Image: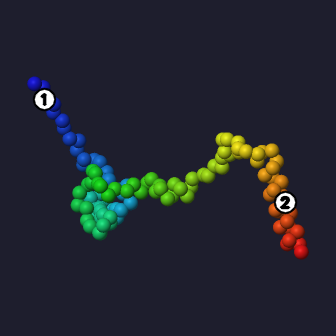
Amino acid sequence: MNTIVMKKAALSDERSLCHACYWSHIQKGFRESEEAVYCCFSKFRAVPFKVADCTDFSNKNLPTRREMEEIALIIPTRPARKTSGFAGAGFAGEVEEETEEEAMVGAAE
């Protein structure tokens, strides 16, 4: 029977997930060891360790859905099909022209 030995990678060199989180509040001092991290998701609480995984993580470097909708381009497209019926033969256009002419005549009077 073969045994598989798995070693965990040391997280001491990794940056905390809080550095990229929208809900974090980070205060840094002049020394590398002077850093205070707070989570503001539900209430303002201190985080005394480096976080590897968080259920409330919201990446502040990515745009939100609302921001994506604001910057999205709206591309007008023509319908793929032609209109059905006699609208293309000139019948529908004549009726619309008559109503526009009647409206102009009524406004002029």
Q: Position of residue 79 (x, y in %)?
A: 66, 45
Crowd rating for badge 2 (residues with CA inside 10 Å; few <14, some 14–19, many 20+) = few
- Residue at far bottom of view: 109
Q: Position of 103 compared to 18: left or right?
A: right
For residue 98, which numbered disc appears in the image?
Answer: 2
Neighbours of disc 1 within 10 Å: few (<14), some (14-19), many (20+): few
**Mark with earlier residue (2, 1):** 1
* Residue 20 percent location from the top left of the image: 37, 55
Q: Disc 2 vs disc 1: which is toward the camera?
A: 2
Q: Position of residue 49 (x, y in %)?
A: 23, 57
Q: CA distance from mark 2 to mark 1?
A: 89 Å
Q: Residue 1: image x %, image y %?
A: 10, 24
Give the SS element for disc 1: loop
- Residue drawn at the location 19% of the way across and 38% of the way down: 7
Q: Nearer the viewer, residue 24 or 68?
A: 68
Going 80% across and 57% down the picture, which residue do you hit? 96
Disc 2, SS:
helix
Q: State left or right for residue 96 relative to residue 40.
A: right
- The structure residue drawn at horizontal position 86% and vertical position 71%, both measured from the top left corner, is 106
Q: Quadrant of residue 54?
A: bottom left
Establish if 1 lies above or below 37: above
Residue type of the residue flagged with mark 2 = Glu
Instruction: Read off the residue under disc 1.
Output: 3
Identify the residue at horizontal 76%, vertical 47% (top origin): 87
